[in-house]
Amino acid sequence: MGDLPAKATFDFEQYARRVSGGPCFVCAFVAGNPDYRHHLVYETDDTIAFLARYPTLLGYCLVAPKRHLESWVHDMEQPEFLRFQGIVHEVARAIVATLPTERMYSMSLGSRQGNAHLHWHLAPLPPGVPYHHQQFHAVMAENGVLVVDDNSQAALAREIRSHIQV
Ligand SMILES: [Zn+2]
């Protein structure tokens, strides 16, 4: 896997307490709460993209509407969803322009129990990951999160941003 960062064990119990007991992590970030700071990749009037706080893959981004929606099925009409996905696509293109990417994984996760605010995951699988460590294995924090320092995440966010065309 070349020079990818090492992985550290993920404290899922502490994480579960944070996401179920704290404020909405996206709304808090949008409001500027310093405890919920993320490395901004891109923003429009209604959408925000940022690096995941606990990345399982380098360049792992989340894209979210700024207003508190929980379901892309029920809470977005199709034109809004398609505009949102247009930004998801732009951010994905910018990630692959920044990092060698074998496949861009894309999904909506979260639930009413934790991280309810709609946020779209963009998880770039790098080349060279053994097949049995790809797909869900690659994105599960239970398999470890990358050890990446804040400065290199800030630089990565800036580089991804520089490749966004919209
Ligand atoms: Zn929210």
Image (cartoon, grey):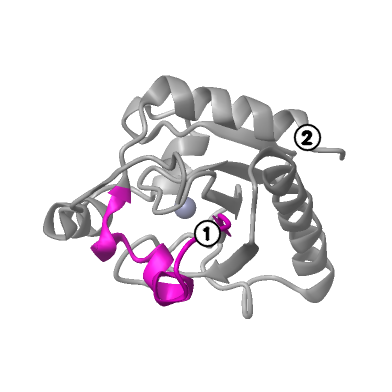
- Report x, y in % for residue 155: 55, 23
Circle 2 Cα neighbour tier, 10 Å, few/some/many (<14 / 14–19 / ≥20): some
- Point 77% across, 57% down: residue: 89
Magenta segment range?
124-145
Q: Return the residue nearer the eye: 157 or 102.
A: 102
- Report x, y in % for residue 153: 47, 29
Q: Measured along the vertical axis of the image, is residue 159 above or below residue 79?
A: above
- Point 39% across, 54% down: residue: 56
Q: Which mark is residue 163?
A: 2
Q: Return the residue nearer the eye: 151 or 16.
A: 151
For marks 2 and 1 on the same chain, the one whose residue lies earlier in the sequence: 1
Name the side, left or right, on which 146 lies relative to 44: left
Name the side, left or right, on which 106 lies relative to 165: left
- Report x, y in % for residue 78: 80, 75
Q: Measured along the vertical axis of the image, is residue 155 above or below residue 57?
A: above
Q: Identify the image quadrant of residue 164.
A: top right
Q: Amino acid at mark 2?
A: His
- Point 74% across, 39% down: residue: 45
Q: In the picture, which quadrant includes the C terminus?
A: top right
Name the side, left or right, on which 145 lies relative to 154: left
Q: How many marks?
A: 2
> Is 129 part of what is drawn in magenta?
yes
Q: Return the residue nearer the eye: 26 or 155.
A: 155
- Point 64% across, 54% down: residue: 101
Circle 1 Cα neighbour tier, 10 Å, few/some/many (<14 / 14–19 / ≥20): few
* Residue on which disc 1 sits: 128
